[in-house]
Amino acid sequence: MRLHSKVQILSILNAHLVAYPTPLNLNYAWNGGSLAGMMLASQMLTGILLAMHYVSHVDYAFASVQHLMTDVPSGMILRYAHANGASLFFIVVYLHILRGMYYGSGAQPREMVWISGVVILLVMIITAFIGYVLPWGQMSFWGATVITSLATAIPVVGKHIMYWLWGGFSVDNPTLNRFYSFHYTLPFILAGLSVFHIAALHQYGSTNPLGINSQSSTLSFGVYFGAKDLLGALFLALVFSMLVFFYPDLLGHPDNLIPANPYSTPQHIVPEWYFLWVYAILRSIPNKTMGVLAIALVFISLFAMPFIGLGGGRFRIITEWLYWTFLADVLLLTWLGGNEITPITSFVGQLCTAYLFFYLLVCQPLVGYLETQFAHGKY
């Protein structure tokens, strides 16, 4: 008798990772989930190893990172693997989300798959932001100052939240200690959320490119799709290695190689590249409170997608065309977020922000409804 039939945990792993029935027509766009899991494991491993050398004190944090890179054997590889791993993690997750939007993978009855995915994205953003603060460079310090001050947009309790995040009346040592504690804890929460995400997916089974019920045409995941995921993992490992060994600072900001200085404000404060689209929306709205509300509305719209739209653009001509304009809009916002504020970039940013909300709040529910009615011959 096989071992997995005797040990319950092995039986569960076999049911969900090996024998799980998977539609036979899945393409490589469905690799995102497994690749994201691999990147999460990589980030947790490198993070634990980095924590052995990091000192969470404003006087020593920057120096401890430099010590890791210059004095610890393979420390530079470890640090750059963690920094560039975060970027690849976001790339994989963004592609995973975009695939879900294109194929309507989170549509009913798979609402919890989509909602848990958006929760994972939010936790990832928080984890990455507080991790960006830990090296205690110029961008770390001023990014923490700018972003945490957004809490003051919340009526009544906003300032209290900001002071709690700071641990005082300015960004200082208590802030760094709190962020270090959160950054170490949140990845384990991410891992738990990922398990819930997989359980929600396996409750109703995976979707497929055709969007039809394929429960009668399935293969065991581990037999065939495991090999396809392995090919994706090898390609990801190639890109990962090229970044770490040849272009380690390609996705970083040079100002973060300068120790934090509260008395010298950088000319252009920008977050990591994977936050630039959010940053562009925030700064395109002059009023801070309205900017924070706009960001909140973006994520509320994402949570509501299974109920107001998310029919998928496959075989729906108008929805597919609007999907590609949405993608172009997000890419343009990302580019604008990395540029200095000028009258032109501000104006274009406002146009892109307006279209983003038009797509999420008008196009998704209205066009999806109309195309469904046309498909059923009611118009």
Image: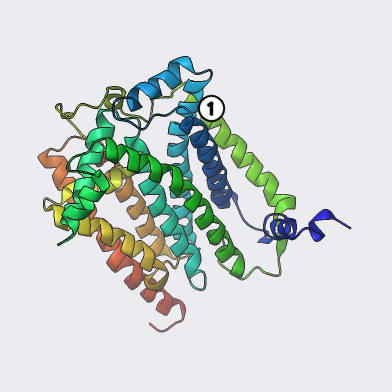
x and y, in percent, of residue 369 in the image = 37, 75
Q: Observer-nearest residue: 310 or 147?
A: 147
x and y, in percent, of residue 342 in the image = 12, 38
| Mark 1: secondary structure | helix
- Assign the C terminus to one quadrant of the image: bottom left
x and y, in percent, of residue 131 in the image = 37, 38
Is 341 rendered above or below residue 367? above
Image point (32%, 72%), residue name: 366
Q: Observer-nearest residue: 35 or 327?
A: 35
Q: Residue furthest top?
A: 71
Please state which amino acid type lies under the numbered disc 1. Ser
Residue 321 is left or right of residue 19, and the answer is left
Q: How is the image coloured?
A: rainbow
Is 126 rendered above or below residue 203? above
Label 1 packing within 10 angstroms: few (<14), some (14-19), many (20+):
some
Residue 72 is left or right of residue 378, and the answer is right
User: Which residue matches tag 1?
Assistant: 241
